[in-house]
Amino acid sequence: MTGMLAGKTALITGGWRGIGRATALLFAAEGAKVAVADLSEDNAAETVAEINRAGGQAISLGGDVTDAAAVAAMVAATVAAFGRLDCAFNNAGISGYQVGMVSKRIHEWEEGAFDRLVEIDLKSVWLCMRAELRQMLAQGGGTIVNTASIAGLIGLRTSGAYVASKHGVIGLTKTAALEYAEDNIRVNAVCPGYITTDMTKTTVERLGDRLMDLVPTKRMGVPQEIAEMVCWLCSERASFVTGAAYNVDGGYIAN
């Protein structure tokens, strides 16, 4: 039985660990050839090595997703290796603790920290989409999935820049879906809830058991559960799905 992405080629950013790594592994298991990108090519190579050991086909790429030339080079390298770009998962991102703004309300955020988070979590998605869309237009179609967050659907205290960025990602996603539907390009977003990754460690430590009181399923999600949604959205099984933002959150925003 062939996988749901058999014959497809994919580019995944932020592919070293967490959701990006889980998605790269699942894409490969489902038959895709995968270009795994991260800020450091050496880090991306760890995921690629696991894929290739399992009999898949993958290459590692390094580059800064906030640099337009680096992003264009990632897309070009993917096409050079695999001939086309069928699926793109724009997943690279950071959270407030990575710019030193843990537990800061809006008036407490530093301008440089705000700018840096928006640059990585929103502008980079636009840069990646722009390069991917140009390739997909040239080849006659493709699919894009952007990592947003439940923070793109609701407000979250002390996460002002993150919330603003993720709302922006959903806005870009919906607009691209409208603009490129007639070009056979589908664009969707996935909105993870609290997932067990390095990015959520400080939140878990800060909130402890109180966090699980907010999640109806009473547990954290795992990266593989986000990967399943991304894989489906990139497959032909989701052929009538575009402009959507799917929350995978254990029921968090149903409260």
Image (spheres, grey):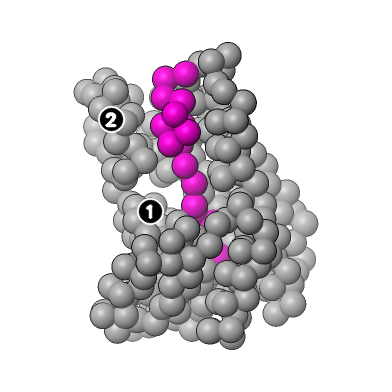
Name the side, left or right, on which 195 lies relative to 106. Answer: left
Task: Name above or below for residue 200 compared with residue 175.
Answer: above
- Magenta-drawn segment: 88-104
Q: Nearer the viewer, residue 182 or 56?
A: 56
Q: CA distance from mark 2 to mark 1?
A: 17 Å
Find residue 134 and report its horizontal and vertical position in percent.
73, 69
Residue 91 colored in magenta in the image? yes
The N terminus, quarter of image: bottom left
- In this orientation, which residue lies closer to the viewer: 56 or 81? 81
N-terminal-most mark, 2 or 1:
1
Which residue is located at x 61 percent, y 64 percent? 70
Q: Residue furthest left?
A: 209
Disc number placed over residue 113 in the picture, else none:
none
Count neighbours of disc 2 (C-alpha within 10 A) and say few if under 14, some if 14 to 19, many if 20 or more: some
Percent position of residue 204, x then y: 28, 30
Q: Residue at x 29, y 22 (%)?
A: 207
Secondary element at tag 2: helix
Q: Name the quadrant containing residue 48.
A: bottom left
Q: Quadrant of the C terminus?
A: top left
Residue 227 appears in the figure: no
Q: Position of residue 145 (x, y in %)?
A: 55, 57
Decide: is 210 above or below 114: above
The residue to which callout 2 is attached is: 204
Residue indicated by mark 1: 19
